[in-house]
Image (tube, rainbow, N blue to C red):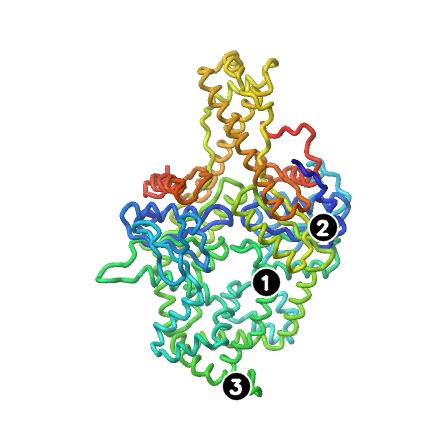
């Protein structure tokens, strides 16, 4: 892996299979970065507002809203972003207003292939590169990306458009976006999985697909990894005791439950090790936290665990 | 609380089974297990999988490339203790290959077909057409049903932030191909002859000349060509979309909604169920996947454990017994929470036919694992009720 650790990069994309906890990991990372003193913006795409359930504040599609000290959230709406882009580029107000009113224009924005992905990534780039009083408006941006296939399309669209656009401001704009997205000093892509065969397989394939497109995969996060308070010697004793003829039902049940915990943790460790071995990326591991609602402290605990992980902070995985 | 309906029996006689639900609930595995169950009872079955895990794909005999059906090795199925009366084929959805075939079929002539297939926009961005992947999933379903080689086709649905996207996909795709507004803006001849449209077109020219200052003329020409090459295909696409829509809504189709015992996928399952009911789709059954079993025992504390562990040679029998007792308490609490979640989702959906699949120790990525899930769907899980070590 080349480039600085994830926490040093301005722009982080959190991708992974549906249901693995991308939103949770994105929120935990953004919270950790803001706690470390970075002015941080957490972005959702496609008008999603899932961070609402974690912070108790619904992100707006209009402007960033502060959900914690130094932590802001926003949701990107492609159609609004298209209007903003054209308004900024064309600088002719009546023309822009005419467009916004035009039904044909809305059909264009919905139907033109790749346009919504392009303006979404363009809006992210715009936020990531915006400067006020000589310094960046945002120190860190964390993007809660859509499910893997759609996320790869989002990350790739700028270079596709650059390659097919020939010449003109859109081509130059796409080129500038593609350069930032592919630059390992600026951007980090984090692939999230859970310790299950399907999710790990998809993570391995996603990492290969991202690397083939020169996108800077920085680390993987395995979420909801089960931990065991039992060691190998405990397992030996539990197995021996499980055969005792005089064991009562409750004793057998406790032995069964303890051995299941041991087996589950071993299973998860194998999945984590398999991912690290196949992809050669640092892998951060997060526990399952049952309650992530605002005020429960769950997200804060998860954020602390994530930021303490060497895979996020930059020490190379063994 | 086990409802134990025979879900496989419930789906018998269907031509199409659509497996839907939030991401990460195990749709692909359940699609394969349902297909296996229907095939075991004598049907000729095809299962369309979307991004199966590599080991599952290997177990099913699906090659990495191509989207043609391949038979699952009957020896493997027999090896897993399943008597097969029918046949099971599996395939992996390749949206691009399906799109290519659709265009080849609907294009008025070979020149029109090649214009699209060679267009750079199509080449790079066909996957980015709104709803394309979801549309291709239902289109592939339609192809397989049409071909008539199968009694039933089981469709796994694509990952999406919204589990309902594939229902809207045919209409979105038709709107794209119709592209009335687009052609007004881009094609000077299109829409001519109607005064209202012509007025819009004048505005369109102003807008597009402004846009072309940004895009450069080449990109705009490419997009324009790409969209215009769909001219003459609208009727075919629209008929296709409506045929797919009728197939999904037909009496011989059943939707199976999959969820897990957690709030987020359960909420999505309830929304999906409601929408399917509202729009008169044939909802068949609910599957709650990965439900933790009650760990057994009689609910009493495991008081004799330290003594047993001492006899078994544990270094710290009291400490180990305490930790084991905690593990038992946690397993009981988790099972109780899962049962509560199952009751909540079942009641939110009006107590439909429901199957509960327990959380398995190993991910069911071999045929044997699928067979086990299949038996849970049949309500014939092993008689001991004991699972896990």
The C terminus of chain B - image quarter: top right
Residue at the limit of the structure toward the left, as seen here: A134
Nearer the viewer's eye, disc 1 or disc 2?
Answer: 1
Question: Residue sitting at 72 percent across and 61 percent down?
Answer: B146
Q: Nearer the viewer, residue B336 or B256?
A: B336
Name the subunit of mark 1.
B
Q: How far apart are marks 2 and 3 (CA)?
A: 52 Å
Question: Residue sitting at 46 percent across and 29 percent down?
Answer: A228
Q: Nearer the viewer, residue A5 or B184?
A: B184
Name the subunit of mark 3.
B
Do the residues bearing badges 1 and 2 touch, measured as CB atoms within 8 Å?
no
In this rendering, does residue A111 appear at all? Answer: yes
Q: Nearer the viewer, residue B236 or B268?
A: B268
In this rendering, does residue A284 appear at all? Answer: no
Work out whether disc 1 and disc 2 sit on a shared chain.
yes
Q: Please indicate whether residue A181 sits to the left or right of residue B86 in the image.
A: left
Q: Is mark 2 on a helix, strand or loop?
A: strand
- The residue tagged 2 is B45
Work out whether disc 2 and disc 3 sit on a shared chain.
yes
Q: Please indicate whether residue B113 sits to the left or right of residue A50 in the image.
A: right
- Say whether disc 2 or disc 3 marks the residue closer to the N-terminus: 2
Please determine whether, in this image, residue B270 is positioned above or below residue B331: below
Question: Residue B168 shows which numbered tag?
Answer: 1
Residue A252 image position (x, y, % from top left): 58, 21
- Say whether disc 1 or disc 2 marks the residue closer to the N-terminus: 2
- The residue tagged 3 is B198
The N terminus of chain B - image quarter: top right
Name the subunit of mark 2.
B
Question: Residue sitting at 67 percent across and 67 percent down?
Answer: B242
Residue B165, located in which quarter of the rendered image?
A: bottom right
Residue B49 image position (x, y, % from top left): 61, 51
Work out whether disc 3 and disc 1 sit on a shared chain.
yes
């Amino acid at each position: 892996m080349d480039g600085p650790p994830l926490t040093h990069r301005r722009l982080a994309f959190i991708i992974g299979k549906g249901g693995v906890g991308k939103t949770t990991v994105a929120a935990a990372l953004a919270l950790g970065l803001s706690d470390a003193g970075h002015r941080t913006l957490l972005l959702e795409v496609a008008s999603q507002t899932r961070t609402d359930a974690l912070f108790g504040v619904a992100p707006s599609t209009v402007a960033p809203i502060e959900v914690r000290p130094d932590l802001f959230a926003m949701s990107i709406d492609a159609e609004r972003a298209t209007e903003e882009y054209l308004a900024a580029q064309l600088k002719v107000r009546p023309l822009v207003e005419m467009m916004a009113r035009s039904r044909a224009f809305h059909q264009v924005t919905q139907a033109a292939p790749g346009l919504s992905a392009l303006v979404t990534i363009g809006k992210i780039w715009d936020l990531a590169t915006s400067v006020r009083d000589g310094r960046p408006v945002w120190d860190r941006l964390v993007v809660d990306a859509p499910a893997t296939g759609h996320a790869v399309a989002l990350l790739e669209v700028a270079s596709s458009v650059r390659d097919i656009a020939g010449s003109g401001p859109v081509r130059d704009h796409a080129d500038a976006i593609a350069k930032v997205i592919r630059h390992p000093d600026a951007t980090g892509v984090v692939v999230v999985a859970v310790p299950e065969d399907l999710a790990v397989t998809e993570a391995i394939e996603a990492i290969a697909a991202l690397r083939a497109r020169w996108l800077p995969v920085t680390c993987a996060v395995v979420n909801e990894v089960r931990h065991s308070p039992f060691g190998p010697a405990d397992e030996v004793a539990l197995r021996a005791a499980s055969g005792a003829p005089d064991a009562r039902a409750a004793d057998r049940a406790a032995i069964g439950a303890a051995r299941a915990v041991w087996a589950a943790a071993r299973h998860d460790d194998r999945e984590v090790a398999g991912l690290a071995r196949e992809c050669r990326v640092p892998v951060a591991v997060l526990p399952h936290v049952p309650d992530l609602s605002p005020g429960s402290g769950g997200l804060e605990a998860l954020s602390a665990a994530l930021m303490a992980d060497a895979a996020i902070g930059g020490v190379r995985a063994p | 609380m086990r409802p134990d309906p025979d879900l496989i029996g419930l789906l018998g006689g269907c031509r199409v089974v659509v497996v839907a639900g939030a991401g990460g609930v195990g749709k692909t595995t359940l699609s394969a297990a349902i297909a296996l169950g229907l095939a075991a009872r004598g049907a000729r079955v095809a299962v369309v999988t979307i991004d199966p895990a590599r080991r599952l794909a290997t177990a099913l005999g699906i090659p990495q490339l191509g989207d043609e059906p391949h038979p699952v090795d009957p020896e493997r199925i027999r090896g897993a203790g399943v008597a097969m009366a029918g046949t099971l084929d599996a395939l992996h959805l390749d949206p691009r290959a399906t799109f290519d075939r659709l265009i080849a079929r609907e294009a008025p002539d070979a020149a029109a077909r090649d214009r699209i297939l060679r267009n750079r926009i199509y080449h790079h961005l066909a996957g980015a057409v709104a709803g394309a992947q979801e549309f291709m999933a239902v289109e592939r379903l339609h192809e397989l049903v049409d071909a008539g080689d199968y009694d039933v086709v089981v469709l796994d649905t694509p990952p999406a932030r919204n589990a309902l996207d594939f229902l809207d996909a045919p209409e979105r795709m038709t709107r794209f191909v119709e592209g009335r507004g687009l052609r007004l803006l881009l094609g000077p001849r299109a829409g001519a002859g109607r005064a209202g449209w012509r007025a819009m077109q004048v505005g369109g020219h102003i807008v597009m000349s402004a846009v072309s200052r940004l895009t450069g003329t080449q990109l705009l020409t490419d997009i324009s060509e790409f969209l215009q090459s769909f001219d003459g295909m609208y009727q075919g696409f629209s008929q296709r979309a409506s045929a797919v829509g009728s197939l999904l809504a037909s009496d011989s189709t059943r939707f199976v909604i999959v969820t897990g015992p957690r709030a987020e996928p359960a909420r999505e399952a309830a929304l999906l169920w409601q929408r399917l009911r509202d729009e008169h789709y044939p909802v068949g059954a609910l599957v709650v996947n990965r439900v933790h079993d009650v760990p057994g025992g009689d609910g009493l504390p495991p008081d004799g454990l330290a003594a047993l562990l001492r006899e078994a040679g544990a270094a710290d029998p009291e400490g180990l017994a305490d930790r084991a007792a905690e593990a038992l308490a946690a397993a009981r609490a988790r099972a109780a929470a899962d049962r509560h979640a199952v009751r909540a989702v079942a009641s939110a959906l009006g107590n439909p036919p429901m199957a509960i699949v327990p959380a398995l120790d190993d991910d069911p990525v071999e045929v044997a694992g699928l067979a086990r899930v299949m038996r849970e769907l049949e309500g014939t899980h092993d008689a001991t009720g004991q699972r896990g070590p």
